[in-house]
Amino acid sequence: MIFADILLPLALPRAFTYRLPDERPVEVGMRVRVPLGKSKVCEGIVLRMHDTPPASKNPPKAILEILDERPFVRPEQLRLWEWMADYYLCTPGEVFKAAVPTGIRDGSYRPTAELYVRLAVGYRSASKIAETLEEIRRAKAQCKALLSYLSFLPVGADGEPELAPDDPQKLWVARADITETVPAAIVLRLVERGVLEQQEIVPATLHRTAAKAETAPPLPESPAITDTSTLQSIQNAFETDETLLLSGEIADYGEKLIALYIALAARQMQAGYQTLLLVPDTVLTVRLTNALQAAFGTRCLVYHSRLTDRARSAAWQRLIEEPESVGIVVGTRSALFLPFERLGLLIVDREHDSNYRQSDPAPRYHARDTALMLARLHGARTLLVSPTPSAESWLNARAEGGKYGSVVVPAADDVRRPRVTVLERGRGVVSTYLRRRIEETLQAGRQVVLFQNRRGFAPYVECAACGATPTCPHCNVTLTYHKEASALVCHYCGWSQPYVSTCAACGMQALTPRGIGTERVEEQMAELFPDTRIARMDTDTMRGAGAAGRILTDFAEGETGILVGTQMVARTARSGDQTGLVGVIHADSLLAHPDFRAAERAFQLLMQLKALLPADGSGELVIQTSHRLHPALIAVTNHDTEGFYRHEMQERHQLLYPPYVRMLRVTFRHRSKSLVAAAAQLCEALLRERFGRRVSPPYEPQVDRIQNLHMLHILLRIERERPVARAKAILTEALARVRKTFPTVRAIAEADPL
C-alpha cells in the first residue's frame, strides 16, 4: 500500500499521512482534498510518497479527491517552504497558507471563458470573402463588422490577412474586440449567416500554443536603454559571484536604473530564463510596470498582495500552465512564492527597505534573505540594489572574504552635490531660515518637499491645566489628533473618539495639541503661502483608488507647489529639475527612536530625500534637529556613505549588534500582565541555563499593550560563528515547556526580528 504525506494550510507541526487511491497516479506537488478530524474536509499538497504506514492505532484515512492532472506546486517551492519554516521558527502549514492564493489552494479558481469568433470553414479564402462582402454590401453594419474582424487577423508577407493559416486557432478573435465599434447583434447576424462561428474559450488555453513559440524580445539597443559600463561590470562580476550588491550613485528609479533592469531581464529571456524583480511597495510596482510592459508586453507579469485573490490565482496558474509566456515578474515580497520554472535572476530593489520584513502573521520573514535562498534553490543569480545598503549587505560586500560581489557606481566627474543645511529646531513648525528658503524657492518657480514622519495633526494632546494626556483604552499609547476628522485616533488598533477640548481628568477646557504631524505642516503652509497649491501624501490621503498616482502626477507636472508627506514621499516621488528644496521638519523623531538601527534608517531616509533634488546641485536639503552633531547627519552633510557605514559597523561590533550577532526574539502576549510576566520569567530561566548572558531579561517593547494584550520580549544573541540552528532547537524545546505550563499565553518566536 502506498501512502502520502499531505501538507495542510494549518499551524500544525507536521504533515499528515493518508492512503493513496488506487485508481489515479499521484505526484509530489499535486493538490488533494482530504478528511480532517471527524467531519472536516481540507485541501492540501502532496509532500512525499512512501510505503511506511503511520505509527497510529487507527488506520490512515484515504485521500478523498485529487484536484490536479499535474503538480501545481514545484519542488523548489516545497524546499523553500521547508527552509522558511525551519529558519523563521514557524510551521510549514503557515508558510503554505501565506504563499498560495486561496483560489489555487482550495481548487476553486476557474479561468473565465470569453466569446470568440472565427471564419467558418467555407469562408477562408480571399475570393469567398470578396463574394460575401458583395452579398452584404447593403448591410453596411455587417460589412463593417466583417472588416473589423479581418483587421485583427495575422498579416502575411503580402500585407493581407492570413485567411487559412496552418493553425486554425489563429483565426479566433475576441468578440469584445469587434464590438468596441460594432454592436454585438450585428456580429451575431454574421454568425447566423454562417460566415463566422462563435465559441466560449478560455484565453489562456487559446494562446498557449502561440506563447510556447514566442521568443524572448531582443536586447534593447537604444542608447537611452542601458548604462553599458555598469551593465558590463555586473555581467563580469556574475561570472565569479552568485550575489552582487549594486550601490553608489544610483538615482532612485531614474531612467538609467530602469533601463539597466530592462537590459538584464532581456538577456535572461534570450537565454530562456525568467527574472523576478522585487520592490518594497505597490506604488513603486506601478511605475516600474509601465516601463517594463512597454519593453516586454504581456511577458511582464505583476504580482502583489493588493491584487484580488482571483488575479493572483490567475498569475499562479499562468506560471504553471504556460511558464514560457512569462519573462519577468514585478512584485512585492509575496512574489517570492510564485511557481517559477526557470528562474535565472532575482533583483531586489532598495534592498535596505524595511517593507521587506513581514511582521504578522507568520511566516515572519525577510524578503531579501528569502530571495537569496530562492536563488540558491534555482541556481540563479541575485542582484541587491541600493544607494544606501543595509548594514548586513554592506558588510557582506565590503568585508574581506565577504559573501557578495560588489559593483559601485561612481559619481560623475562633473557632478555637483546639493547643499545640506542642518540647523537647530525651534519651537514652531518651520524655522525662520526654512520659511525664507521655501518662499525663495516658490518665487523662483520651483517646488518644495516637506517631510514629517508623523501623520495626523499632532501626535498627542495634553491638558494645559493638569498635564493629562488621552490614551487608547486598548493600547498603552497616546491618541493622535486628526484635525480634519476632529477625532483622536489610535494608530495601533484603530480605536477613535470625537475630539473635544474638555479634559476628562480635570474637566477644564484646556486640551492642547502637542507635537507636529503632516496635517499641521499642511495647515501652516496653507496659512503662509495661500496662493500655492499644497498636497499631502500619507496613509490618510492614500486610501482612495488611484490617489497616489494623482498626487505624484500633479507633482511631476509642476501643478503642486509644496508636497507634504511621510516616508511615502521618499519612497515614491521622483527626482526632478523643478524640486528646489527638501525640508525635514523634525529629524529627532528618526534619530531618537529606541532601536539600534535608528541611525542607519535615518541616514538611508535622508539620503533618499536628498536624491529628490536635481542632479545639477542647485537644490538644498534643510534638516531641523536638536542633534546637529549626530554621525548620521554629519555623513549626510558630507555625502559620506562609506564613512557612515564604517562608523556604524564599529559601534555595532563593540555593542554586539547585527550583523555581528544573530538575534532570536520571543514575544509573550496575554490579557493578564502577571501571566505574561510569569511565562517570560520561566522562559528566561530555561534559556539562561544553556546560553548564560546571551539571554536578555524580559523587557517591555515601546508599546507594551496592543488590543488589550500585554507584551514582553526576550532577546537571545548568538555569535555569527556559532551554529544558530542548534540555538533554535534549544529555543523550541524551551518554548514547548513554557506553552505546556502556560497554555493560554501566546509565545511567538522570531529570527532576525529587528
Image (tube, grey):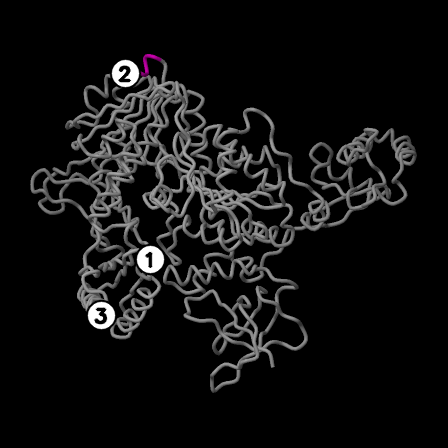
N-term-proximal mark, 1 vs 2: 2
Which residue is most to the left? 466
Disc 2 secondary structure class: helix
Residue 286: give x, y in percent of width and height: 49, 37
Reading the image, the residue beneath label 3 is 686
Q: Main secondary structure of the magenta part?
A: helix
The reply, left or right, for residue 751 in relation to residue 21 is left
- The residue closer to the viewer here, 70 or 130, is 70
Mark number displayed over residue 439: 2
Q: Nearer the viewer, mark 1 or mark 2?
A: 1
Residue 323 position in % (x across, y down): 62, 50
Q: Amino acid at mark 1?
A: Ala
Seen from the viewer's position, the closer of residues 689 and 360 is 689
The quadrant of the picture occupied by the N terminus is bottom right
The residue furthest top is 444
State the residue lying farthest toward the bottom: 57
- Residues 140 and 345: in front is 345
| Residue at screen point 20% across, 40% down | 592
Determine the residue positioned at 36% across, 17% down: 446
